[in-house]
Image (cartoon, rainbow, N blue to C red):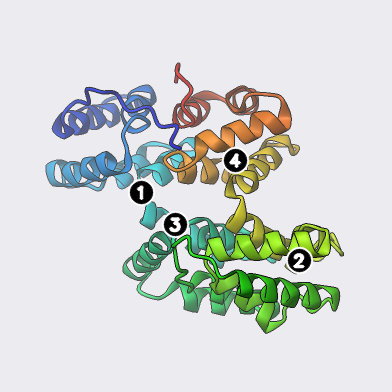
Amino acid sequence: MSTLIVPAQVPSVAEDCEQLHKAFAGWGTNEGLIISILAHRNAAQRKLIRQTYAETYGEDLLKALDKELSNDFERVLLLWTLDPAERDAYLANEATKRWTSSNQVLVEIACTRSSQELLLARQAYHSRLKKSLEEDVAYHTTGDFRKLLVLLVSSYRYEGDEVNMTLAKSEATILHEKISQKAYSDEDLIRILATRSKAQINATLNHYKNEFGKDINKDLKADPKDEFLAILRATVKCLTCPDKYFEKVIRLAINRRGTDEGALTRVVTTRAEVDMKIIKDAYQKRNSVPLDRAMAKDTTGHYEKMLLALIGHGDA
């Protein structure tokens, strides 16, 4: 469920482009005007604005933003203005180049998008970077992480609701056996998590809990300092309850000493048109504070206004 507030009567694309051009012209940039337009247009409208802006003014809107703005506000605008598949390609490329074993962005992209969205992100990666996401992930990662992540980013899962209960039971047993043996990087364990449909994985993990008395993620917490186990837990969470996964990313981004603006910007820009309403509800339930209030306390200026607009805060 989207939190994006798009007015019923939207000005023409040409008017939007003219206003944006004015916002960049003269002395100083009119950030408020930029927010009032871009934060209230959906993906299709933003794509059209970008095309029309380039045709009219001979410059990519993203380049204009890049020249005029800086810091966190620039990043939130750049990510938001990108087409969703391009944005995922951009974030995935960043994650591979700066990859560390605690970086869960690749898991996030591979496991919270639909099969089609992940395929489009891989195609955008080809177009943008003239190489494949799979080859970059394989090149920048090692060992067990490589085994898991290459399979996850190259997966094309079945999207239907059909579930094979016999398979769910047998694979729940396989998962339990492997985890009991601490064989966390076992081929079968990775195969199940990386290739089965989300509906099938849900059935398997429900059976796991019923049969063995514990959530699989509790069993995957055997060693809290093991970063491969953390990546496996993130994989399970992203596949089965993305709203809770994203709520935690936001909570940790806000609650740490010094806000993690990178994580906050990434979640808001990638989820505003998807399930931000559910994430906001999950945040309020978990923290007894509305998300917009928590964000307003932790961010400032135009960056704060842009974030609040994207999560559906009426005044932004």
Q: Earlier in the sequence, mark 2 or mark 1?
A: 1
Q: Earlier in the sequence, mark 1 or mark 3?
A: 1
Q: Quadrant of the C terminus?
A: top left
Q: Which mark is residue 88?
A: 3
Q: Quadrant of the N terminus?
A: top left
Left or right: residue 259 compared with residue 224: left
- The local secondary structure at tag 2 comes to helix
Q: How many marks?
A: 4
Instruction: Decide which of 15, 169 is in the foreground and name it.
Output: 169
Q: Quadrant of residue 64?
A: top left
Instruction: Decide which of 70, 248 is in the foreground and name it.
Output: 248
Q: Which residue is under mark 2?
A: 229
Q: Earlier in the sequence, mark 2 or mark 3?
A: 3
Q: Nearer the viewer, mark 2 or mark 1?
A: 2
In the image, what residue occupies the spot 21% across and 30% down? 16
Q: Are marks 1 and 3 in contact (CB under 8 Å)?
A: no
Q: Which residue is under mark 4?
A: 261
Mark 4 vs mark 1, CA separation in Å: 18 Å
Q: Which residue is under mark 1?
A: 82
